[in-house]
Structure formats: C-alpha cells, structure tokens
Amino acid sequence: MGLTEGESRDRIGPVKLSGPMTEGETAHAWSRPAREAPVMTDRSPLRDLSAPSFVTRHIGPSAADRVRMLAAVGHESMAGLVAAAVPEAIRARTPLDLPEAVSEAGALAELRTLAGRNRVLTSMIGLGYHDTITPGVILRNVLENPGWYTAYTPYQPEISQGRLEALLNFQTMVADLAGLDVAGASLLDEATAAAEAMTLARRAGRSKSAVFVVDVDALPQTKAVLATRAQPLGITLVESDLTGDLPECFGVLVQYPGASGRAAGFAALADRAHAAGALVVAAADLLALTLLAAPGEQGADIAVGSTQRFGVPLGFGGPHAAYMAVRQGLQRQMPGRLVGVSVDADGRPAYRLALQTREQHIRREKATSNICTAQVLLAVIASMYAVYHGPEGLRRIAQRVHRHAAVLAAGLRERGVTIVHEEFFDTVLARVPDRVPGRAGEVVAAAEAAGINLRHVDADHVAIACDEKTTTGHLRAVWRAFGGDPLDDTLGGPLDDIDRVTPDALPAGLLRTSAYLTHPVFHAHRSETAMLRYLRRLQDKDIALDRSMIPLGSCTMKLNATTEMEPITWPEFADIHPFAPIGQAAGYVELIETLEAWLAEVTGYDKVSVQPNAGSQGEFAGLLAIRGYHQARGEAGRDVCLIPASAHGTNAASAVMAGMRVVVVACDGDGNVDIGDLAAKIGKHRDALAAIMVTYPSTHGVYEETIVEICERVHEAGGQVYVDGANLNALVGLAKLGEFGADVSHLNLHKTFCIPHGGGGPGVGPVAVKAHLAPHLPGHVSAAPYGSAGILPISWAYIRMMGGEGLRQATEQAILSANYLARRLAAHYPVLYTGRDGLVAHECIIDLRQITKETGVTVDDVAKRLIDYGFHAPTMSFPVAGTLMIEPTESEDLAELDRFADAMIAIREEIARVASGEYDKTDNPLRNAPHTADCLTADEWPHPYPRSVAAYPMPGLREGKYWPPVRRIDQAHGDRNLVCSCPPLDAYQAADD
C-alpha cells in the first residue's frame, strides 16, 4: 500500500535507501504494514519539510514576537485581544468560506492555467487602446521594480524627489505635445479625464447653459462615462458632427483624430465655441500629436487623452495613465495632482505637489473632483518612454504607424474596398465592397482566424488600427481577410511598390511645425546604460517599502509580494485589448468572476463589480446605486447624504458628484459619531434622507460601538448606509460589512488586497452592494468594462495564497501591531482616540498639539526629522490637525516596529531638549530637518548642535543610511511661483552659485 495523507516513513518503518537488495527483499519494502512498531528516528516527516506557507511570509512578526507584543498590550492571546477590541455586535459568526490556501508555486501554477485560457491575438481594434513595446530597461527597472511600485503618493516631497522628477517629465511631455501651458500628473483613464474636463469647463466657462456638446466621432466608452457623470449633475449631452452651428452650451468635446480614424482640424469650431462663451476640450492621441498640429494651436482650452501607447501594456483595459493639459488661467481648476518646482531651505530647486489647497481631503464638498489618486506608476512608464525615445524617436514611431495605415488603405483600395476617410493617422475605416452587402462580420471573422482582431463597426464597415507592433505581415493578413488573391507574400513584392507610390494620408494643413520635448532630459539618455543609470539615480532619491516601513494611517502600506506581482507582465494578461471578443479572454473572465465572488464572501455583500479603477470611482458608483434605488421607488427627492465630520474628504466630493446635498454630522469628544446630532439631523431631513457615509473602523482609528445603531437609525428613516472600505484591513475575517447593517461599500484593492500604491496609483476600488442595490449599479464609471483588469491577478493571488484563515490572521496581526505601537508611544505622546479598554483598531493617532503649544515643535518638524531617521512620516494632520496617524500593517516585523518606535521616542527626547532650552527653539535638529549630505559636508556648520546629531541620531543609522536629496521644501514659494514643467538646467546652476 502507499502512503496515506498525513502518514510518514517514521510511522511505516525504516526503508533501505541505497545499495542492492538482499535476497528476499523486494521493491515493496517501501510500504511495510503500518501496524509494525515505529522506529525512532531524528528525521523530519515530509509534511514538516514543505516550504513555509505564504501566510508566514506575508505576516511580519513571528509566533515568538507575537507573544512579546501581546504581553506589551496586556493580553495573553490573540483571541483575547480581538474579543476586547472588536465589538461583539459586529463579529462574524462563521469563518470565511474561501478555498484553502495554496503555496506561492501553487498560486502561480493556477494563474498559468487561467492565463492559458486567454488567446492573445494581434490587436488592430483601436478605440484608444493600442499595442506597444515597453522598452526592457523600463519594464524591468520601473514596472517590475519595488523601488518604484511600492512607493506612496509624494505628499512628503523631500523623500519623493525621484518620482516627482519623473512626473514633472510626464507633465512636460504632455504640455509640449498638447501645445498647452500646464499639464497634470495623470488621471485615471481617458473617459474619466474627459468627464473631469466637462465639469471643469462648466466651472470655468462664462456660459450659463447646462448643455455639453460631444463629437459624434468620440470614443464610445468616453460617451458612456460622460453620460454617467452628466445625469446626476443636470448636464445635458448633445451629440454633433461639429460641422454646423453649435447649440448654446458651456463646452464642446472634439475627438482628435476621431474614433473612425478621421483626422480633421477644429480651429474654426474653437472660434465659434469661444464666441459663445464655451470652452473647447480636445480628446487627443499623444502619438498623433508628434505629426499633427497641437490642440492648443487650434484653440483648445483643455486637452485630455491616454498615454497608454507610450509603453504601457494593454492589460485588458488598464491601468493606464490619462492626461489633462489646460491653457493658462485654468490650472487652479484642474482635478487631480500637479507637480511644481519650488526651492528647499538652501535655495536649490526642488519638486513638490503644487496647489496643495486643492487636495480633496481639505476641500470636501467644495472639491473640484473626488479624485484622490492618479496613475503614477503608469505615468512614470510613459514619461520614461518619451525620455528613452526622445522627440525624434517618438516621431519615427508615429511615422511608422502612419505609413502602415496608409499602405494598408492603399492595398485595400486596390481590392475594390472603399476607404471612408481620405485623411487619417493610424485608423482606416473600410466599407466592405458593395457587391456583397453585410459582409463586415465575415471579414472580421476571417481576420480573427488569421490571428488578428479588427473592429466590427456595423454590417458594412470595418475599422483597422495600426500601432507600434504592426508589421507588413499584418497588412497582408488583413488584405486576405477582405477576400481575393494575396497581392504577394514576398517582402520585396508589390507591398513595397505600394509603399513607394502611396502618399501620406495626413491633412496637409494640419502638419505639426512646432517643436516639442526640447528639454535636455529628453535628449540625454539614449543608450540603455544611460537610461538604466538615470532610473537608478531617481529611485535612490526616494523612500519606498523596499527601504523601510511606511506607517501612513488610512493607507495600509502592506507587503506587495513578488509572487503576486509576477503575473501582471505575462503576455496572456498584459497583451489583451479590453474590447477583444470576450471568448478570447476566458481566463480573465474566470479570474474576475472568482475574485468578485471572494470579495463578496469577505464583505458579506451579494454583488461586487471591479470596474471602478480607484476608490473614488467606487464611491461614486455606490452612491449612484443608492440614487437609482430611491428613484426606482418613486423617492427621487431623497438627496441628503449625512457625512461625519471625521470622514475622508472624498466622501463629500463623491456625494456632490452624485447629485446629493451634504449634511455634516458632528463627532463627540471621543471621535465617534455623535448619536444625538445624528438623531437631530435624521429628524430634520427624514423625508429627504438618501444615505449616510461612514468609515468603519472610524477614520479616528477605533471600532465605534454604535455602528449597528447608526445603521438601524438610518434605515428606519428610509436611508441607505454606505460604509467606506478604506479601513477594511481591520475587519477581514472578523466582521462583514454587509452583515452588520451596511448596504454598499467600496473596497481598496490597493490597500487591503495588496495592489501596490505605485507612488500614487494605480488603484482599484470595487463597489460591493446588497442585492436590492445591484440592479442600480451604473454601467460605466470607467473606460474599460473591467477597469484596471491588468492588476487584478495581484489581489487574486493574495487571497488564494492566504486563504480564509490567513486573511483573519493578517487582520489580527494588524490590530496587534497598531496596539503595540500605541502602547510603546503612549508614554511619550498622547494617543488621541481609543476604544474599549484603551485599544485602537489597526491604526492610532498621536497628538502633538499640546507639544506644539509648549515648545513650538510642529507636526511638520517631527515628520521631517523622521526622514533623518530613515522613515517616511505617518499621515500628517488628518483627520485632526496637529496629529500623526500611524498604521503599521501586519507585514512589518517586530524589529522594524521597534525601530520606528525608537525613532519616535528619540525625537520626543529631542523635543524635550527644545523645551528645556538645551536646544535653540528655532535652530535645532527638528526645525532644520531633514539634513542632506551636502549641508553636512559643507565647510561651515552654523548650527549649535553637532553634525553627528543631525546625521546619525541613532547608532544603527551609520549602516545603510538614507540621505535625502533636498532639505525642507518651501511650499508657499512653489505656489506663488508656479512652474509645472521641467526647469532649465541653469536653474540648478544658479542655486549652486
């Protein structure tokens, strides 16, 4: 008999492992009867020799560490801690019903199987998505590099100079190509960027009209997202071919070139629009703009689009970095983030996020947008693609793309096919020969059989888009798909003849003559060696998770495991067009449906959609579902959204976007929702109450005991309960949102489920709803049907390798780690809010307000001094000004937790020296932090404390010291002198002089 599950050779008895068999011995010696007496051995059984589970790799502290940590917080067991911290009323009664965890190798094998169910064909579909070649030096050293993908949004600019420079390159690239003054640091996708442009035009334009005119030749996904955004805001969309008179409107969107491929100028249209007080938005293809006149040169006020074809994989729809550029005067109306140039304490140029007052957390319901993130990692890739190729390289790629399209069209004409538009850039719209009407489907099918996807426009029309990967072989295959004999399959045959005699198909009056990408950065890194070193220099300027913990509260900067990241660059996931026939994406569909089911199980909801490509879009989708539910019940008047004062700023912004009125509910002295004020607000707005938006655990880092009562009160008044999933890392496996009273939530896969933050994006914000809201989910909040599908394998792998038990353990460890830090720091800094038994949830807030009042040392001083200790600061002044919010996550081991706590305690001792007068109140290590190597090695040291205190405040820092590239940055100077493109090199020289 063979080994049964759980048996080992120790139980079976000794087995001869080498040498010839003796007389009477047989091969069956491997399976002696189990009833024989076991022989003692010091060998380990096979089951104990398996690789450690992924759970032990993901969770930082060891079992022994957990014993120490539990003792520090006054509990004997994890179960005891959880019972004390998490209210019994919300606790799940059953464990998560998820598949048993598999190993890292097992998860990759299953993903390989899923990937194998996808069919990767050559995509010639177009519609804003084009296959591209990611240069290997960028693929390996940015997209697959944790030094880039584990960084956080650059709110702490002194330790973010590398990615800020890359983003400034992005902005310069976009502004140059668009011919406009200022560009932002990326948006979520082209369709949502167009929607943001629509609302910007309404805010900034002179017209009082509620009409927005949309080019009939706009991308269909853009039209769909515009419709989703317009309806709750009372905006009327009017489609037009833009050739005649415009209706009274506040803005016009023109697609340039059009979805059909048509390339036409719009300067006359812009004149007509401006005369009527309307703004002009151009949705433009950046690669085409290397050959065609810039939108700004034709009168566009705003340009939007995608940078996907600048080296970013298709990914079944995303993530991709969209862009927005505006003319002078509109920059303070822009949504999203803007990188600007300022100076540091030594007067040297330094980068930072400009116009900080636009941050949505601050402006709440008055925000320009609900966007809280961007697509930084993808923007970095796109910018580096431009840096690597330079203007002449981009132009050569564009010319090659266009020549393929022109030759393709000429060959089709020779076959009797009518080309609808004579002037185009990369997309050819072909009318199938009239002799056999309705044959478009046959042509598309024939091309698919040859391994190429074309776009089936209607029964008689097919569109074919060329891209960076298009070859002459693809052209021949398309010609054959349209029928007839092949022209010639030899490279030197008629195709070359067609190429030689075929003119370009670009409009003669629209050819670009203006220069672009003239800054030296786009000319200095042509060799791979130079590019490699440039990327390394930028990476070394920053702090990411590969260097130290990032204890940002409400951000959940946990491990992004390499195994989770590996599949996203497999061609079977990376190279599929979002509008490819769904049968070609069977593996993707299975992965997505499985992930949605797992997320529904984790949250207790009935339906999950992964389409929203950021938490802000998930919020918006959830609120639209609530709005649709009330309207379907004949209660369209329910438009009041209650939001606690402690809530994320995006909550209020999302509510306004969804057509709701925001009413703020006060918090009590302990940071919880004030039940009395809630009752009063419900009473006042009972008939108009649409919803309440709460975050749980609260933004103050505690499990509010009254959450079930809050849900019941809102439901009794006819409202719905929206629970923000930002803090889900404190609930997974312990409680389910949908079981303790919530109707809808958005989740953050880039927090709880391990998609990396990427320096400020990508993110995925699935919306999860109870069954009664499911029919009212909007169909289009993102451009692609499945949003940022290309990174969903990350969260799938995380859940698959953790299993239900592992996910619960991760949550418990997150709670323990937060309480451990709170206890270690409590003797030195007040912990502002705690729950039952003085416990916090997965994060804690330390209060510096009294310290600042007594010593003058501010939260900024502490944050910048932490840089000298090698740490990214916790979240500053949110949700309470003058505080730091700390979230360690489950992934940091005890040594790193202690290193951070030791740093904070040492800083508190430095503050005490300021208070005692030992340190000068204005010239001390905190006020002057961070300290660069440059300032420390200067010939003169004007400060009253030693250089060693500035550089090495703790002994361990002498090994592996992080040196910030700049000193403290002057934020106000940057806003007063707004510069949002690459500064000339002499700016740096002037600073040195």
Image (cartoon, rainbow, N blue to C red):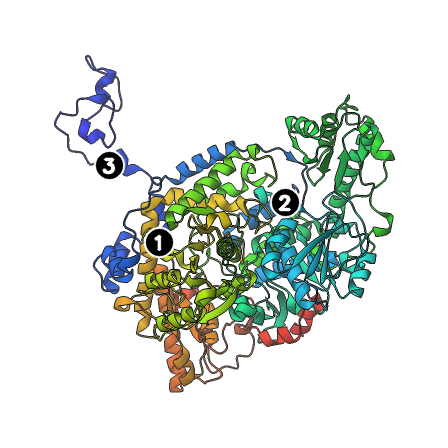
> Which one is in front in this view, the residue at disc 1 or the one at disc 3?
1
Q: Helix or strand or loop: what does disc 2 sit on?
A: loop
**Neighbour tally class for label 1: few under 14, some 14-19, many 20 plus, Cα within 10 Å:** many
Disc ID at residue 60: 1
Spatial CA distance of label 1 from label 3 is 26 Å
In the rendering, at what x and y percent does residue 309 appear?
Answer: 66, 46
Q: Helix or strand or loop: what does disc 3 sit on?
A: loop
Q: Is residue 689 visible?
A: yes
Q: Is residue 285 above or below residue 85?
A: above
Q: Quadrant of residue 102?
A: top left
Q: Which residue is mark 2?
A: 135
Residue located farthest toward the left when viewing the structure as drawn: 37
> Which one is in front in this view, the residue at disc 2 or the one at disc 3?
2
Tell me which label, 1 or 3, sits earlier in the chain: 3
In the rendering, at what x and y percent does residue 740 appear?
Answer: 34, 56
The three-letter amino acid code for the residue at tag 1 is Gly
Task: Name the residue: 69% across, 73% down.
Answer: 990
Q: Which residue is mark 3?
A: 44
The foreground one among 729 and 2 is 729
Q: Is residue 460 above or below residue 128?
A: above
Q: Is residue 699 above or below residue 463?
A: below
The foreground one among 8 and 695 is 695
332 horizontally vs 278: left or right? left
Q: Is residue 878 visible?
A: no
The three-letter amino acid code for the residue at tag 3 is Ser
Spatial CA distance of label 2 from label 3 is 48 Å
